[in-house]
């Protein structure tokens, strides 16, 4: 579905997508109200949503569109989604799967067409199997689980990608006010977005949040966010643990990557290390999760039903590395239970 108040933009986007055999535009709407009416009667995999529209803006309507979409994911396509625009982080936090700047009229073809198609393929289709058929997938939803260590929590490290911002906020809001440990976050976002992202987490979750700096010490209860151009890793020197930013290529190809973060947390904290893998495409985090488990720590993974994209958590769950596979708020309550049991 294409949702844009410009008939010209809708026509251009429809023509672009019509050139690819794996896409079909099944609905178009000029405003959010019309889009929500169509979502009641039409199965949609992805909604391409403009932000600036008459009536309710795309940003204002986004949570309702996500709720009404029956699993449909939202890709923001807007001139306001330029790099560094705070509106992009707000949209991702409100439930958008991804955001793509809308080019000027002369630049709609060529490179933009390929980028748009790639984003849509990565977001993927909605799984609408009937419940009876879905039973065949039950082993995916209930993998073999590991025991949660009973050691005091030393460090909590969270990794996420596409669809990860709302999952991160749900998780952090459900944590106890005090866990006695620093919180690390690696979210796949460009560097220029990170100050907005840290501010969004601080406002939404009521915890201090900052973009990690090389050599900085860790503070319990504070969220330390990986910068967009480096992996957030740790080094231990006796009783002190400090941030070490690493810009080497990671196996996943992502920067920042979840794998180096979890690997370094495992080395620094051993059985006090706890990793959480939330919504995201690809396999980033699986290597680090294995290193963390081998060091005596534990890994939790978001479940399929609550994920925008069940890629990163799925790989960890299917590898048998997770101690729990649940929605984000339930995972946070598991962390709270571990903290309470160690007091």
Image: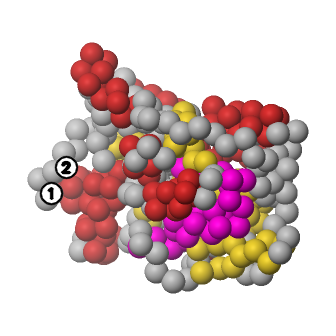
Marks 2 and 1 sit apart, C-alpha to C-alpha, by 6 Å
**Quarter that holds the C terminus:** top right
Q: Which residues are magenta?
A: 253-277
Q: Residue at x 38, y 43 (%)?
A: 318
Q: Residue at x 26, y 66 (%)?
A: 113
- Residue toward you, 174 or 125: 174
Image quadrant where residue 44 sits: top left
Residue that carries the numbered disc 1 in the rendered image: 20
247, above or below 127, in the image: below
Q: Secondary structure at mark 2?
A: loop
Q: Residue at x 80, y 78 (%)?
A: 237
Is residue 24 visible in this depiction of the protein?
A: yes
Colour logic: secondary structure
Whole-percent x and y of residue 125? 29, 42
Whole-percent x and y of residue 248? 51, 83
Image quadrant where residue 194 sits: bottom right
- Residue toward you, 32 or 160: 160
Magenta segment, prevailing SS (helix, strand or loop): helix
Q: Secondary structure at mark 1?
A: loop
Image quadrant where residue 61 sits: top right
Whole-percent x and y of residue 150? 72, 41
User: Looking at the image, which residue sits at the far top?
Assistant: 132
Q: Are marks 2 and 1 in contact (CB under 8 Å)?
A: yes
Residue that carries the numbered disc 2 in the rendered image: 23
């Amino acid at each position: 579905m294409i949702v844009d108040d410009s008939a010209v933009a809708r026509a251009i986007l429809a023509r672009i997508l019509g050139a690819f055999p794996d896409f079909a535009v099944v609905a178009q709407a000029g405003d959010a109200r019309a889009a929500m009416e169509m979502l009641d009667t039409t199965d949609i995999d992805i909604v391409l949503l403009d932000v600036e529209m008459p009536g309710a803006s795309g940003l204002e309507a986004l949570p309702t569109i996500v709720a009404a979409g029956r699993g449909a994911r939202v890709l923001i396509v807007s001139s306001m989604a330029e790099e560094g625009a705070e509106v992009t982080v707000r949209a991702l936090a409100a439930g958008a799967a991804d955001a793509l700047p809308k080019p000027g009229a002369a630049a709609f073809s060529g490179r933009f067409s390929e980028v748009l198609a790639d984003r849509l393929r990565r977001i993927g289709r909605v799984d609408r199997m009937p419940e009876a058929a879905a039973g065949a997938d039950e082993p995916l939803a209930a993998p073999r689980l590991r025991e949660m260590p009973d050691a005091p929590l030393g460090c909590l490290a969270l990794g996420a990608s596409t669809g990860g911002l709302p999952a991160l906020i749900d998780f952090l809001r459900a944590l106890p006010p005090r866990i006695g440990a620093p919180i690390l976050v690696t979210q796949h976002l460009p560097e220029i977005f990170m100050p907005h992202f840290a501010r969004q987490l601080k406002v939404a979750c009521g915890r201090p949040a900052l973009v990690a700096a090389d050599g900085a010490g860790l503070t319990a209860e504070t969220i330390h966010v990986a910068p967009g151009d480096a992996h957030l890793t740790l080094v231990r020197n006796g009783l002190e643990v400090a941030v070490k930013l690493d810009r080497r290529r990671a196996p996943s190809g992502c920067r920042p990557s979840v794998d180096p973060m979890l690997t370094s947390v495992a080395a620094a904290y051993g059985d006090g290390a706890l990793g959480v893998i939330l919504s995201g495409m690809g396999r980033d985090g699986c290597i680090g999760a294995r290193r963390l488990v081998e060091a005596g720590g534990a890994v939790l993974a978001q479940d399929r039903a609550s994920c925008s994209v069940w890629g990163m958590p799925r790989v960890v769950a299917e590898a048998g590395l997770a101690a729990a596979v649940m929605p984000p708020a339930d995972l946070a309550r598991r962390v709270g239970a571990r903290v309470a049991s160690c007091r």
